Amino acid sequence: MTTVPKAKVFPVSTEVNDLDHLVIGGCDLVDLAAEFGTPLYIYDEATLKAQASAFRTAFQSRHPNSKVLYASKAFINVGLARMLSAQGLGFDIVSGGELAVLRAAGVPAADVYFHGNNKTPLELRDAVDWGIGQVVVDSFYELDLLNKLSGEAGRKQTVLIRVSPSIDPHTHLLTTTGVLDSKFGFPIETGQAKEAIELALAAEHLDLKGIHFHLGSPIFELEPYEEAVTRVLTFASEMRELGLDMQEFSPGGGYAIAYTEADEPPPPSAYAEVIVKALKDGCAKYHMPEPRLIIEPGRSITGPAGVAIYTVGAIKHVPGVRTFVSVDGGMGDNIRPALYGSEYVAVTADRATVEPDVTVTIAGKYCESGDVLVHDAQIAAVTAGNIIAIPASGAYAPSMASTYNANGRPAIVMVADGKATLIRRRETYADLMAQDVI
Ligand SMILES: Cc1ncc(COP(=O)(O)O)c(C=O)c1O
């Protein structure tokens, strides 16, 4: 087997075969394109398992009382939920829909934590009735509502309070959440977090188990975690006078991945080292028992495992300006470049080891000028029919997909040991019209 191009950003099982095609999980990407069509999302089971295990080991080896929850928003469906649950992961959800998926997958309710800044009464009722592990309360409205709903259900719902520690993790403004000017969480700085703890402790039908925060995503630096853990532990120590017994502590997710070869994300062990040390130091300083540690990686579990493949169609040369290579997907299956200016790389999957000899703009098929997947992609030259692979596409691409321009959303396969299992079929024209009342 030959060296894999841009191997850093491809799944661990990626190879190149004698036909010079990229191979993932033992499956030739050209064969997958022929069998399932394009655009197609391919998840490498080996990478999913490796990432899940890396986070579990990194945290549990340093703090055995740790639990890894996969943040479902990065991408979830029934097949993936079963697979990750079997790897010992719990789940974080942010909607009744994600709850329904996990429930259908047979995930234990106790392993699920419910986040969100505006959970609806219906969603909260479903969660309470299901016996969900924790509701992470995010507003005074929710505190009141959940207390009422839990009382009606004859339950005492376990909860965490989401605080906002006023720490900037230096990531994209649109994905920054732990600063004062954010819709998420009770700010510590304004005294509202203290008030929320007081109310939660007094609520008859709530059982306050601890504190959660989430800074944003992706976070390439370790210092924001250290600073935030320290600040929130100081806050928790002060809340003891109100009666808080912090049994759980959750610094959320946000762990970075490499989208391009220039990206240098810290390994899970580096995040674990900083977070666990800050937790242990804070607990020792304030003479608090060490709580259960809950972490919520999303992007870093599914992101590196997913590769999107597309078929090249029209190619437009604008002399002296640029060459547009249009593919059969785009912003409908991956909105991240248009929404956040996210950068990706591309490889010509059926000319895998040919040295990149052209610089092109890989454009989608949607009716927006901003529908570009990769700017200035350096690839082996293509003509119509070639297959383009974009790695590191597993998180926040299929989960944010839309049916814009009435294009169906792509099929998704999981690959391992030379076998591709369809975990989501391609959306058909009939699917697109299924909810229309005619
Ligand atoms: C509360 C919470 N936890 C976890 C995550 C997952 O973040 P990431 O996928 O970057 O790990 C998010 C992302 O928005 C979040 O809001």
Image: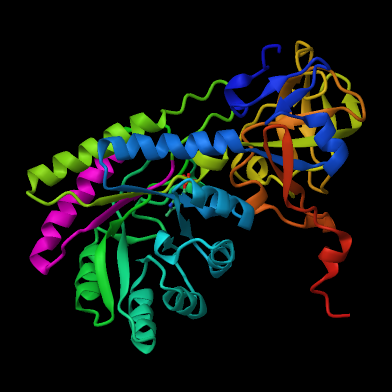
**Residue 417 occupies which quadrant of the picture?**
top right
**Residue 304 visible in the picture:** no
Q: From the viewer's perspective, is 191 left or right of 368?
A: left
The residue under the point 64% across, 31% down is 344
The residue under the point 21% across, 47% down is 231
Indicate the quadrant containing the N terminus: top left, top right, bottom left or bottom right: top right
Q: From the viewer's perspective, is 292 left or right of 319?
A: left
**Residue 196 occupies which quadrant of the picture?**
bottom left
Colour scheme employed for the rendering of this structure = rainbow
Taking the magenta stretch, the answer to whether it contains residue 231 is yes
Q: Position of residue 198 (x, y in %)?
A: 19, 72
In the displayed structure, would residue 228 be above or below residue 143? above
**Residue 407 occupies which quadrant of the picture?**
bottom right
The magenta segment is 225-254
Q: Position of residue 217 (x, y in %)?
A: 46, 43
In the displayed structure, would residue 2 be above or below residue 241? above
| 323 vs 101, nearest the viewer | 101
Q: Main secondary structure of the magenta part?
A: helix
Taking the magenta stretch, the answer to whether it contains residue 384 is no
Q: From the viewer's perspective, is 222 left or right of 20?
A: left
Indicate the quadrant containing the C terminus: top left, top right, bottom left or bottom right: bottom right
Q: Position of residue 437 (x, y in %)?
A: 84, 80
Which residue extends farthest bottom? 152
In the displayed structure, would residue 164 be above or below residue 23? below
| 341 vs 99, nearest the viewer | 99
| 25 vs 394, nearest the viewer | 25
Q: Position of residue 84 (x, y in %)?
A: 52, 48
Count of numbered tags? 0
**Residue 394 visible in the picture:** yes
